[in-house]
Image: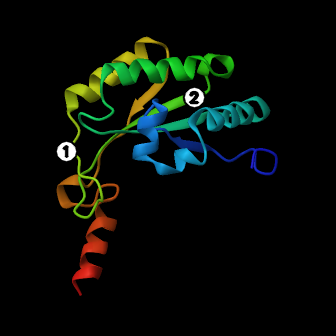
Amino acid sequence: MTQNYPQVNLTFSLHSPFNEQRSKLMPINEHYPLLDVMDTLDEHIRVTSRKVYIAYIMLPGVNDSINHAKEVVNLLRSRYKRGSLFHVNIIRYNPTVSSPMRFEEANEHQVVNFYKELKSAGINVTIRSQFGIDIDAACGQLYGNYQKNITNK
């Protein structure tokens, strides 16, 4: 992809800087371990000089601690050019009706503290805006409702 489509923006779903926890949240981590993927992203940045986006869904009581934020900082600071071409997008979790795992809605205080920890360490970070949660149309919710309606027919 780096060689054939260097203009494409990449987003990597991190969701936990801790390998064992990431494997529980994202079983694909067993096949593509975190540090191997980070090495590949470093190479992409070296070759293309393009920013790589890091998606981080905030799961209350799971991955939203300051300890998690500090480890995200450590992970990115150890990368090529001290992580200056990584940009973290913090995404508030949106509860869905048919998710195999149940989580509460993100705690705004934790989201802001996580953001501040990354920002104060010089990490490029944005808190993504939430749209549609009030009508069950936020990220993942429409699909969850669609699946619920299909199985009920």
**In whole angstroms, how far apart are the C-alphas of marks 2 and 1?**
28 Å
Q: Which mark is residue 86?
A: 2
Count of numbered circles on the image: 2
Quadrant of the rendered image containing residue 140 = bottom left
Q: In what element is the residue under mark 2? A: strand
- Residue lying farthest top? 120
Q: Horizontal and vertical percent for residue 120?
A: 41, 12
Above or below: residue 89 compared with residue 142:
above
Residue at 81%, 46% in the rendered image: 3
Q: Residue at x 26, y 55 (%)?
A: 132
Q: In the figure, residue 15 lies in which quadrant?
A: top left
**C-beta proximity under 8 Å, tags 2 and 1:** no
Task: Answer above or below: position of 124 versus 37.
Answer: above
Quarter of the image with the C terminus is: bottom left
Mark linked to residue 9: none
The numbered mark, 2 or 1, whose residue comes first in the sequence reads 2
Q: Residue 104 bears which disc, if any?
A: 1
Can residue 15 be seen in the rendering of this structure? no
> Residue 3 versus residue 75: which sits nearer the camera?
75
Q: Which residue is depicted at the point 41% across and 44% down?
A: 24
